[in-house]
Amino acid sequence: MQTRITPLVTGLAALLALSSGAAMADYGHQFRDRAKVVSSTPVYEQINEPRRECWTEYESREVYRNGNSTGGAILGAVVGGLVGSTVGKGNGKVAAAAVGAATGAVVGDRWNDRGGSYAHEERPVERCRVTDNYRRDIVGYDIVYRYNGRDYTTRLPHDPGKWLDLDVNLSVAGHPRDDRWHESRSRW
């Protein structure tokens, strides 16, 4: 306690020296002192950093599948070619076999179409959503400190701990007679 009073007494003595006429050119003194921190309250800022979340779902749907396969067309071509080769003589036999094969392929393919069915098909579907992601950051501290029996407040970017260093500036306070003093130093 004694060490904190000493700078204050020194400061008051300097103030008295300044108030004398000889020290009027010297306008103030500055010194460093300490004040007791009464409270330190963190100040938070809420920040949103949205986050995108994605996942895969499987969708099931019913799909009609026709019996369209090359097997029916091939079988129809073979049967049509055999039947066509039994008709005609010579080169006509070859032409009839070709026409029979082509006709059999078309008939076999269409016959196979009638054998279609419904089936369930699953396909992957990507789904996404954006969710809020809030976090709180400390942006400073509201400080209440006590100096010379009075409480003061300030905001600092850091927590000062139990004590706060102060720069104290002493200067002569204005006096109602100061205006007259500047008008004429000879009259008071």
Image (cartoon, rainbow, N blue to C red):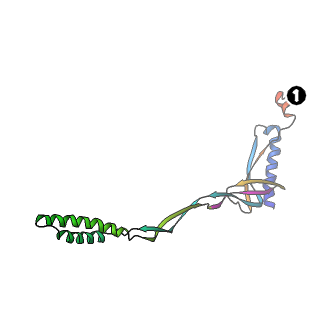
Quadrant showing the C terminus = top right
Q: Position of residue 21 (x, y in %)?
A: 82, 37
Front residue of 34 and 115? 115
Task: Specify whether 173 is left or right of 50.
Answer: right
Q: Residue at position x 76%, y 43% from top? A: 28
Does residue 29 sit above or below 95 in this rendering? above
Q: Is residue 136 found inside the magenta-colored segment of the image?
A: yes
Q: Residue at position x 74%, y 60% from top? A: 41
Sort mark 1 into few (<14), some (14-19) or many (20+) by Cα contacts within 10 Å.
few
Front residue of 10 and 49? 49
Task: Specify whether 61 is left or right of 83.
Answer: right
Q: Residue at position x 29%, y 65% from top? A: 106
Q: Residue at position x 21%, y 64% from top? A: 99
Q: Position of residue 104 (x, y in %)?
A: 26, 67
Task: Specify whether 21 is left or right of 116.
Answer: right
Q: Residue furthest front?
A: 88
Does residue 116 sit above or below 184 in this rendering? below
Task: Specify whether 61 is left or right of 183.
Answer: left
> Dominant secondary structure of the magenta stretch?
strand
Q: Position of residue 96 (x, y in %)?
A: 18, 65
What residue type is disc 1 on?
A: Arg
Q: Residue 150: which quarter of the image?
A: bottom right
Front residue of 44 and 108? 108
Quadrant showing the N terminus = bottom right
Q: Is residue 127 found inside the magenta-colored segment of the image?
A: no
Dot 1: element: loop
**Which residue is label 1 attached to?**
187
Front residue of 7 and 86? 86
Q: Magenta part of the protein: which range? A: 134-146
Q: Residue 19: which quarter of the image?
A: top right
> From where the camera sits, is residue 116 visible?
yes
Give the mark count: 1
